[in-house]
Amino acid sequence: MKEDPKHIRISEYNYPLPDERIAKFPLPVRDQSKLLIYRHGEVNEDIFTSLPDYLPKGSLMIFNNTKVIQARLHFRKETGALIEVFCLEPIQPNDYVLNFQQTEHAAWLCMIGNLKKWKDGELKREMTVKGFPITLTATRGECRGTSHWVDFTWNNAEVTFADILEVFGELPIPPYLNRDTEESDKETYQTVYSKIKGSVAAPTAGLHFTPQVLDALQEKGIELEELTLHVGAGTFKPVKSEEIEGHEMHTEYISVNRSTIKKLIDHDGCAVAVGTTSVRTLESLYHIGVTLAENPDATEEELHVRQWQPYEKYDQIPPVVALQKILEYLDRHGMETLHTSTQIIIAPGYDYKIVKAMVTNFHQPQSTLLLLVSAFVKGNWRTIYDYALSHDFRFLSYGDSSLLIP
């Protein structure tokens, strides 16, 4: 029986991160960032364009193709108070694609800035979208934890909610950048392969890739596949409890195509993951397969990966078998894509099933992402972070990158 990750003390995952080491802006050319290479305990460095040199021919590399939405909406009350409504996840309809296509009404779970100034009543904002003058109205509903149900209505059936966010929304950049969003962020805070709208934070390990690097990977004989995990604001939620048992992981929505699962099976259930979001999705697939092995008729809700689920079951079915179970499930239901959600927490004590190497940036002290990295490198994260701090690496979302091969 492994150590119980619930009793990990988050204070053991702290390190000094001076503000000047946090990259406030990206480099002018994405792929010129530094690349730390950690291989079997050894650390050295290179430049990101050299990434293909470190991966074996025939590897399968998996990217998260989510696109960051302009999720922040600002309303000014008649009193002059500015209220920020930050769209976190769709509730009515609760499917991202359908919600973005809504005309006249959409409901979202939102975080509200300056909440005390918005006791009741509607917020209104006049705007012009696609040449139509419209009035957007926000009405606050029930409180759910730290968020609120918000109904948005507008008076034009030609305009979708996606159109409104595109014109009226602001891109949410990470809070620790301590600056306002700039026009340039609309481009630099998206990966070059982003497609599927729904994230409120970028999968930042992907920000280093350029079309040239993607071409070089394919020339090396590395196969590229995509999946989607929509990153929630919870990704920035600090661990407040002393032990991680007290930290509730946020739910994130994932979708993986049948072809990607098939490709994973062809590669013996082994992958190189770009970013912690791809890691969480790939590892969640294994646990979804375990659920289906036990209960082939599981509902979409039952396929949701609970936070501690990986630590409760020790029935070791091979990754390929788990993936095969998902494929059979999709075939039985005539589905091309697996849609479900995950709350997985990957912490020391976790046994990785599918991810054999990962590309990732440098994460905040005392964060769940640092726990994920520590679990991957068998607790050796300090070696990596001490090297990065003493060799002038840039940290966090717009910072430099690392390739980890345990």
Image (spheres, rainbow, N blue to C red):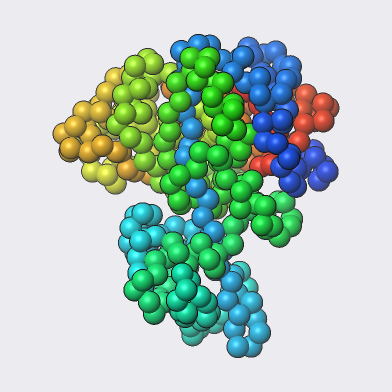
Give the position of the N terminus as an image quadrant.
top left
Near-viewer residue (287 or 178): 178
Q: Is residue 227 left or right of residue 6?
A: left
Residue at 50% over, 47% down: 67
- Quadrant of res 293: top left
Q: Position of residue 127 (x, y in %)?
A: 52, 77
Residue 291 visible here: yes
Residue 352 visible here: no
Q: Position of residue 136 (x, y in %)?
A: 47, 77
Q: Is residue 152 above or below residue 11?
A: below
Q: Is residue 398 left or right of residue 305?
A: right
Q: How many marks?
A: 0
Q: Is residue 387 above or below residue 159?
A: above
Q: Is residue 46 left or right of residue 255?
A: right
Near-viewer residue (18 or 246): 18
Residue at 67% over, 36% down: 30
Q: Is residue 405 above or below residue 10?
A: above
Q: Position of residue 346 (x, y in %)?
A: 51, 33
Find the residue positioned furthest to the bottom: 78
Give the position of the C terminus as an image quadrant.
top right
Near-viewer residue (388 or 366): 388
Residue at 26% over, 37% down: 336
Q: Is residue 142 above or below residue 81?
A: above
Q: Is residue 355 left or right of residue 306?
A: right
Residue at 83% over, 43% down: 20
Q: Position of residue 219 (x, y in %)?
A: 52, 17
